[in-house]
Image (cartoon, grey):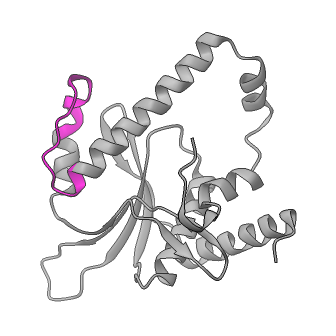
Amino acid sequence: MPRKYEHNYPSVTEIIQEIFNKGEGFWRWKLLGSEESHEKGKKKAASGTKIHSLVNQTSQGKRTRYPKIYKPIKHRIEDYFRDKTLILNEKALYDHDQNYCGTPDYIYSEQVATSVMPPIVLEDLKTGKYRQHEYDLQLGAYVGLARINGYTIDKARNLMLQDGHITPMPWIDLDNAVEAWWKVLWLYKWKYGIP
């Protein structure tokens, strides 16, 4: 179920889903799939939501009680966030000029052993199948929103959490990803006659 945002703005995810077709296979499954396959999809979605919640709490340094099924990943998640100073976590960001919003998972600074300013990193956690172009475009939107809201982002990437392992994906080209996002946003507005 889509998150409800203030101002009734569409989210980055909603905009991308409107522009990018999920393909014939997805719609065939959605319309003709068995009840069993739909239940399996619901369980995967619920599991992804639960994992997201656990990782977000852990990233904030909160004591987090992991259900037995997720205990094997607890230490990996704690280790991953150990050397990071969280700046923003699951906070909705708004572009009031273009009337859209989105919620990046993490913006943090990395602790570095030198006297240089630590880089500011934006990461988004994914638990399902990796769809690189769609997810990189989403990152471009989040980087754009972060910039509009006063955050300077030096690096951005997705994190895949699968089979109990956190796998950082490649860093994206920030400027190209943001430029691609602006084109998708323009297409979305054109499609719906939004000025």
Q: Does the magenta run of residues contain 25?
A: no
Q: Which of 95 and 180 is in front in this view?
A: 95
Residue found at x 35% / y 31%: 163
Name the quarter where the N terminus is drawn. top right
Q: Does the magenta run of residues contain 67?
A: yes
Q: Position of residue 174 (x, y in %)?
A: 52, 75
Which picture quadrant has residue 71? top left
Is 70 situated left or right of 36 in this image?
Answer: left
Q: Where is residue 194 in the image (x, y as percent from the top left)?
A: 81, 71
Please give the range of residues in magenta: 58-74
Residue found at x 36% / y 36%: 50
Is 99 situated left or right of 121 in this image?
Answer: right
Which picture quadrant has residue 16? bottom right
Give the answer, above or below, for where 147 lies relative to 166: below
Name the quarter where the C terminus is drawn. bottom right
Give the answer, above or below, for where 21 lies relative to 26: below
Q: Position of residue 139 (x, y in %)?
A: 52, 64
Residue extending furthest toward the front: 7
Is 113 situated left or right of 176 in this image?
Answer: left
Q: Nearer the viewer, residue 191 or 165?
A: 191
Give the answer, above or below, for where 178 lies relative to 64: below
Residue found at x 40% / y 83%: 152
